[in-house]
Amino acid sequence: MADHALALSAMGRGNAAACYRELGAEMRRLREAAGLTGRSIARKTKWDPTRVSRIESGQINIDVADLCWYLGILRVDRDVALPLIDLCRQAKEDKGFWLSQHGEWIPDTLSSLIYHESTASLSIGYEPMVVPGLLQTERYAHAMISRERWRTPADIESAVEIRLDRRNTLDRLSSKYVFYIHEQALRLEVGSANLMYEQMIALTLAAAEPKLELRVVPAKAGARSYFGQDFVLFQYEEHEPLAYLGGAVTALFLEDPTYIATYSALANELASVAMVAEESRSFIAALADEYDRRGFRHATDRVEEEQF
């Protein structure tokens, strides 16, 4: 799959902007939750039923006034409506990118990420510092999330549950996933050696899945192994590609072809530097063994100290 990134920018076939697809999917979800059909909305708005369908599929644009009318018919609460109105405004600006803010329980950025990764046919991600969220074990996810001191205990548990639920995306039969993970992300000890042993075993097993491709970017490649911050490229059967850049406060979604071409080129370079899949799996399995020995030595030393 070394040439997958080259195909990424050319294979999208639709004109539905990612912003409008996400907005339309949420409008449809709210309508169905309200127990209304597309035809009943069409009657109330006097829109053609096909227009309602195309808006909800993101195929045509909707302006803020019409969105407010739609949400008003559904009697959507203000707190639910405002983020959608803001998303609509950003979509109308048509900059080729948009920012998504973090919220309290399910951040807007995470809601957007879940939607776009769950509808993609191919996902190519790069992670330089930590194990990718979709591949994290429960203990690893808990250790990473609980380090954020602003979170309450209840918020930590909720965030861990959401992260684990995201892994259901990997069960979609029609999707393929390529994960480029820098060696330093695998050597960064989170929690304990025992926790890392568990995480490495989970990665080794995941690497055996036919639709998952895990490739390690080796530190020995020196400067060639540096690719900046994490990113994910999404490819769709019927839409143009989308790029996602995570952040501590906001996330950036890119859909302009120029941006996509840049990250597609980065993905190609990653493919040329990273270990092949089998070598990567062996490398991760060896790391698991290393963490296992370290954890055993630590446990032995602790028992000896207690006996002393």
Image (spheres, grey):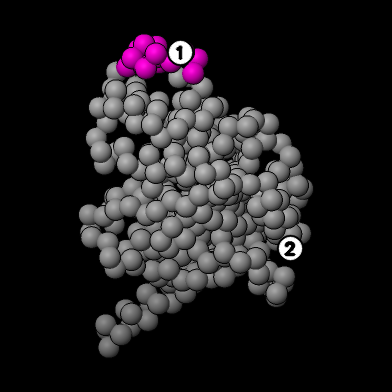
Q: Is 276 placed above or below 300 here?
A: above
Residue at numbered disc 2: 273
Q: Residues at badges 2 and 1 in contact (C-beta under 8 Å)? A: no
Q: Dot 2 lies on which element?
A: helix
Residue ID at (23%, 59%) = 153
Q: Residue 245's mark?
A: none
- Would you say the magenta stretch is mainly helix, strand or loop? helix
Q: Dot 1 lies on which element?
A: helix
Question: Is residue 48 inside the magenta stretch?
Answer: yes
Q: Is 256 placed above or below 288 here?
A: above
The earlier-in-sequence mark between 2 and 1 is 1
Q: Residues within 10 Å of mark 1 (few under 14, many from 20)?
A: some
Residue at numbered disc 1: 49
x and y percent of residue 41 in the render?
36, 16
Q: Amino acid at mark 2?
A: Val
Which residue range is magenta in the image?
36-51
Place residue 175 in its image quadrant. top right
Residue ID at (47%, 45%) = 90
Q: Residues within 10 Å of mark 2 (few under 14, many from 20)?
A: some
Q: Amino acid at mark 1?
A: Pro
x and y percent of residue 159 in the render?
33, 52
Let me know if residue 221 appears in the view: yes
Let me know if residue 212 appears in the view: no
Instruction: Locate the C terminus by quadrant.
Output: bottom left
